Image (spheres, helix red, strand yellow):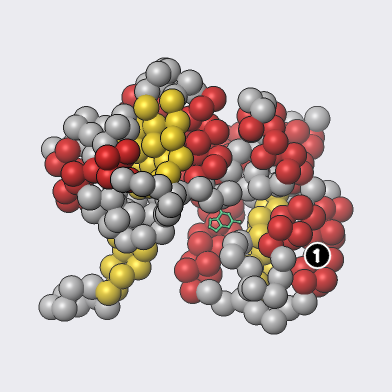
């Protein structure tokens, strides 16, 4: 059986460091890191994610604010709010929870965020820095950054020459994940819905990252023996008939089968999910340090 990669433990370690840095900054007269989380509409999953982000920010000792806009809010109102947060010296990180409703242009919204407050790492400046090997001076998107920490925990920092397959090409996870693995000298393949013979490709991976949002798509026989499997999916599906709960959470990987073959694997929940929040806190405290000079 494979090693279970404990994202909760790693997340707690990162958050411990963030708390220490926050206390240090205050002691130096640098004030509190400020995080503004914005949500438009009432998507239940997004509401849970946003509540967790705001709560963790408070636990870290941050100035934490949440703005909730109605589902029919005008794009102009959202852009105006972002402009105000850009100008607010008490705010060091701005996160607009995605997806936003269809009548709002998410690209426009993201690019309105000041790059130095873009703790999601989604603006052109931060994406460009990551893509050109300047990740050290960029905000790196939280889910891929957290996934890299989990991979390094298992395989060590030297990933040079390993074959990495990333399933999914989203701007939030797949593409930045591929860039991080490339920067770590992996041989990277990005697979997606048009990829031919995905199972055979996946079996070449020493590091397999699944980020497609399809419940249990990656089967045990897609996994190379000994591979490190990072499951980014969080899918809520109907629970088996006789069980009490109405739904259950599963990843993009069929866990039981994959765990028999993999060297190490992240569970869902308790794997990548907690790391996303921890890296958001890390990016926000880093932003506050930069602002304090
Ligand atoms: N929706 C799903 N993941 C994310 C994320 O990391 N950041 C934002 N802003 N929205 C998301």
Q: Which quadrant of the frame does ligand 1 lie within?
A: bottom right
Q: Quadrant of residue 289?
A: top right
Q: Is residue 59 left or right of residue 290?
A: left
Q: Quadrant of residue 42?
A: bottom right
x, y percent for residue 43: 53, 74
x, y percent for residue 204: 29, 32
Q: Is residue 252 left or right of residue 86?
A: left
Q: Is residue 233 left or right of residue 23?
A: left
x, y percent for residue 226: 21, 30
Q: Looking at the picture, does residue 183 appear above or below residue 176?
A: above
Asked whether residue 169 appears in the rendered view, the answer is: yes
Q: Residue at x 27, y 45 (%)?
A: 199
Give the secondary structure at mark 1. Answer: helix
Task: Name the residue nearer the viewer: 116 or 28.
Answer: 116
Quarter of the image with the N terminus in it: top left
Quarter of the image with the C terminus in it: top right
x, y percent for residue 31: 75, 42
Q: Quadrant of residue 291?
A: top right
Q: Is residue 128 left or right of residue 18?
A: right
Count of numbered circles on the image? 1
Asked whether residue 60 appears in the rendered view, the answer is: no
Q: Residue at x 41, y 59 (%)?
A: 213
Q: Residues within 10 Å of mark 1 (few under 14, many from 20)?
A: some
Q: Which residue is mark 1?
A: 79
């Amino acid at each position: 059986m494979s090693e279970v990669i404990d994202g909760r433990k790693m997340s707690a370690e990162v958050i411990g460091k963030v708390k220490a840095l926050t206390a240090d900054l205050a002691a130096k007269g640098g004030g509190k890191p400020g995080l503004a989380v914005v949500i438009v509409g009432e998507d239940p999953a997004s509401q849970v994610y946003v509540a967790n982000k705001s709560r963790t920010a408070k636990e870290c000792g941050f100035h934490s604010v949440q703005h909730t806009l109605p589902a029919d809010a005008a794009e102009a109102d959202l852009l105006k709010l972002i402009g105000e947060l850009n100008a607010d010296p008490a705010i060091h990180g701005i996160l607009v929870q995605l997806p936003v409703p269809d009548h709002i242009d998410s690209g426009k919204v993201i690019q309105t965020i000041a790059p130095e407050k873009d703790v999601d790492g989604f603006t052109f400046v931060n994406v460009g820095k990551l893509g050109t090997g300047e990740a050290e001076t960029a905000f790196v998107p939280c889910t891929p950054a957290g996934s890299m920490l989990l991979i390094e925990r298992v395989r060590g920092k030297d990933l040079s020459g390993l074959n990495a397959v990333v399933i999914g090409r989203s701007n939030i996870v797949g593409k930045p994940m591929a860039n991080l693995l490339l920067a770590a000298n992996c041989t990277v393949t990005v697979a997606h819905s048009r990829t031919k013979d995905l199972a055979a490709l996946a079996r070449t991976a020493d590091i397999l990252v699944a980020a497609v949002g399809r419940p249990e798509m990656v089967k045990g026989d897609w996994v190379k023996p000994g591979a490190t499997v990072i499951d980014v999916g969080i899918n809520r599906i109907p629970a088996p008939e006789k069980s009490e709960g109405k739904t259950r959470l599963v990843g993009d990987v069929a866990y039981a089968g994959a765990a028999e073959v993999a060297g190490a694997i992240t569970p869902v929940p308790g794997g990548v999910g907690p790391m996303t929040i921890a890296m958001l806190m890390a990016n926000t405290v880093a932003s506050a340090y930069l602002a304090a000079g």
